[in-house]
Amino acid sequence: MRIHLIAVGERMPAWVNAAYAEYANRLPAECSLNLKEIPAVKRGKNADLARIAETEGARMLEAIPKDCLVVALDEKGRSFSTAELSRRLDDWMHSGRDLALLVGGPEGLTDACRARADLVWSLSPLTFPHPLVRVILAEQVYRAWSLLRGHPYHRE
């Protein structure tokens, strides 16, 4: 299964790219994590943020590969323990379909992105900077996979 992390924003700080790559590179081909960056629309002083979010959301939806399961990351979504996420990952891996994870920009995801999702997932009730979400997602996917495979990375 390929996991497509579709995220708004390019040119992340070096520490974000390094941390993301650290976990993404640990994952095997059976659960590969691939980043698709969606260019952020420029935000000026009097920017129409709703229009910007709609534009970015439409670009995200266009980037979803055909026949993917879609999971939208949103603070109002469902939260999972590590064990629950690991079971979900196992189900996704056995579904025969790839997975797309949607991470919005500063304005979050649009209603259209959430409506397209098969699941809306919350990493936390806290709000995280969207670059940091990439790192957290990569680490959590690796942790869930390692739990499935009995790897000692995750400890109870």
Image (cartoon, grey):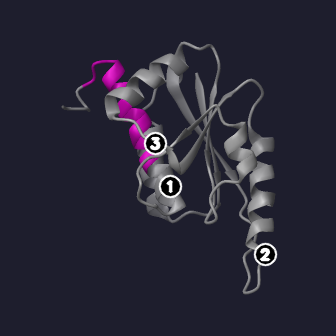
Mark sitting earlier along the chain (2/1): 1
Task: Indicate the quadrant where residue 5 lies.
Answer: top right
What residue is pinned by disc 2? 48
Q: CA distance from mark 1 to mark 3?
A: 11 Å
State which quarter of the image contains the N terminus.
top right
| Residue depicted at x 72% and y 76% | 43
Determine the residue located farthest toward the left in the rendered image. 156
* Label placed on residue 138: 3
Left or right: 147, with 47 as reference point: left
Residue type at tag 1: Asn
Tell me which amino acid carries mark 2.
Asp
Q: Residue at x 79, y 51 (%)?
A: 59
Give the label, 3 or 2, closer to the camera. Answer: 2
Closer to us: mark 1 or mark 3?
3
Q: Is residue 37 magenta?
A: no
Q: Which residue is mark 1?
A: 17
Q: Which residues are magenta?
A: 136-151
Q: Residues within 10 Å of mark 2 (few under 14, many from 20)?
A: few
Q: What secondary structure is marked by label 3?
A: helix
SS state under label 1: helix
The quarter of the picture where residue 83 lies is top left
